[in-house]
Amino acid sequence: MRSSLIWIALGVLCASGARAEVGKGKRAVDFNLTALDGKKVSLAAHKGKVVLLDFWASWCAPCKQELPELERLKQAYEGKGVVFITINIDKERSNAAQIVERLKLTLPVALDPEGTVAEQYELPTMPTSFVIDRAGIVRHIHEGFRGAEDIGKFKRELDELLAAK
């Protein structure tokens, strides 16, 4: 019995050690998800671009405030080398679809109903956003949403990363 517990403990330690830690200054974890429109979405497909990656859910009030602001930000950065990807973690696809329709979003919405990608990114709260540089390194992490203050930070961070060659 005791040796079984030791093996279980070692397995847990190894498994936790194998988990990707996504933090500031670390490489962003790639993913392959399907979007609401049926297209495949991966981080690797945007290598060489600055990426704003945002996790959200239909039940999250701050998420619903943030999404229209991200939509406007996406339009402002159109053609400048910034990619916006949102990942919805709802179990039901229809919940995400209703929000996208109601808010008239054109942002790409990848679906993570099992929470696999969300778990890899170890989300502290909803929404959580990651600003990723051209080399795939997480440069900034935003927890929650505080309106204009956060949009201002996103703009400064995106501009800074776009200016870096």
Image (cartoon, rainbow, N blue to C red):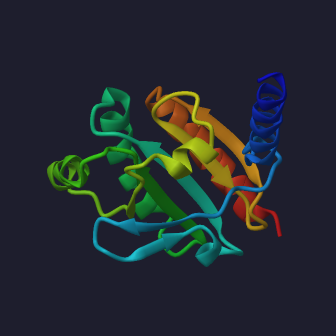
Quarter of the figure with the C terminus: bottom right
**Left-right relation of 42 to 20:** left
Residue 73 seen anywhere in this rendered image of the structure: no
Q: From the top left corner, tell me how far across and down residue 55 is, in percent.
A: 47, 45
Identify the residue at horizontal 29%, vertical 65% (top origin).
Answer: 36
Q: From the top left corner, tell me how far across and down residue 1 is, in percent.
A: 76, 24
**Left-right relation of 137 to 53:** right
Total tally of numbered discs in the picture: 0
Identify the residue at horizontal 58%, vertical 66% (top origin).
Answer: 82
Q: From the top left corner, tell me how far across and down residue 116 is, in percent.
A: 52, 50
**Placement of 158 over or under 40, stated as above or below:** above
Q: Quadrant of residue 134?
A: bottom right
Q: From the top left corner, tell me how far across and down residue 26 is, in percent.
A: 81, 49
Query: Which one is nearer the viewer's eye here, 19 or 161?
Result: 19
**Placement of 127 over or under 69, stated as above or below:** above
Identify the residue at horizontal 67%, vertical 56% (top origin).
Answer: 159
